[in-house]
Amino acid sequence: MNREDLRLVAFTVIEKSKPKKGKKTVKKEKKKIGLFHLWGTNVNGKGNEKFYGLIEDAETGNLLEVSFKDIRFLNEDEVEELAEAALEAEEELFIELEETTEVAAEAVLTEETAAEVAAEAATAEKPKRAPRAKKA
């Protein structure tokens, strides 16, 4: 199956994290975007069959088994909204990068100008030697 054939989905996963000060594990539900690959089933320890979807996380590329209850296929309008939001975020980053580059270029020019002025001042301040008198 080609990557272009995969459908875009929104899915929810539970991420576990251990806080620094406490001993209790914290679980957070996190909504993510991914690509749907296929359906599958697993048998848990009690012999019950669990139905899941194999989802590729769009950020990390990891394949995750996600419960069918936590998967939602996105329609074309939602996909377009996501694409537009991504383009806007990319444009903002590009503008920020340009501004940072301009500020850095100005700082370099200022440093070069200061170095030139200092060099000119140093050569202007050097006293000139008087010519040596010739011995007869």
Image (cartoon, rainbow, N blue to C red):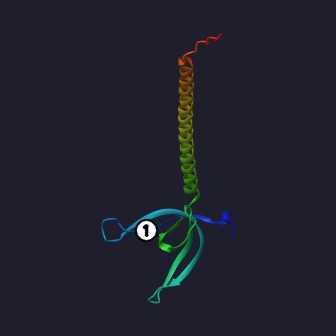
Residue most extreme to the front: 136
Q: Name the residue nearer the viewer: 119 or 21.
A: 119
Which residue lies most toward the left here?
A: 22
Q: Residue furthest bottom?
A: 47
Secondary structure of the residue carrying numbered label 1? strand
Query: Relative to residue 97, is residue 74 depicted above or below?
Result: below
Q: Identify the residue shown where x is 54% and y is 22%.
A: 122
Quadrant where the N terminus sits is: bottom right
> Residue beneath label 1, please?
15
Q: Amino acid at mark 1?
A: Glu
**Residue nearest the viewer, comparing 97 with 44:** 97
Residue 72 drawn at (x, y percent) = 52, 66
Residue at (57% x, 79% y) in the render: 40
Q: Would you place residue 91 above or below residue 57 in this image?
A: above
Q: Position of residue 2 (x, y in %)?
A: 69, 67
Q: Answer left or right for 93 relative to 29.
A: right
Q: Residue at x 44, y 64 (%)?
A: 30
Query: Please, is residue 51 above or below residue 82 in the view?
Result: below
* Circle 1 Cα neighbour tier, 10 Å, few/some/many (<14 / 14–19 / ≥20): few
Measured as percent of width and height from the top left, residue 49 is found at 50, 85
Give residue 69's position: percent from left, percent from top: 47, 72
Nearer to us in this view, 90 or 40: 90
Q: How many marks?
A: 1
Q: Which quadrant of the figure contains the C terminus?
A: top right
Residue 123's image quarter?
top right
Q: Is residue 65 above or below residue 28?
A: below
Residue 91: quadrant of the picture: top right
Give the residue drawn at x 50%, y 62%: 32
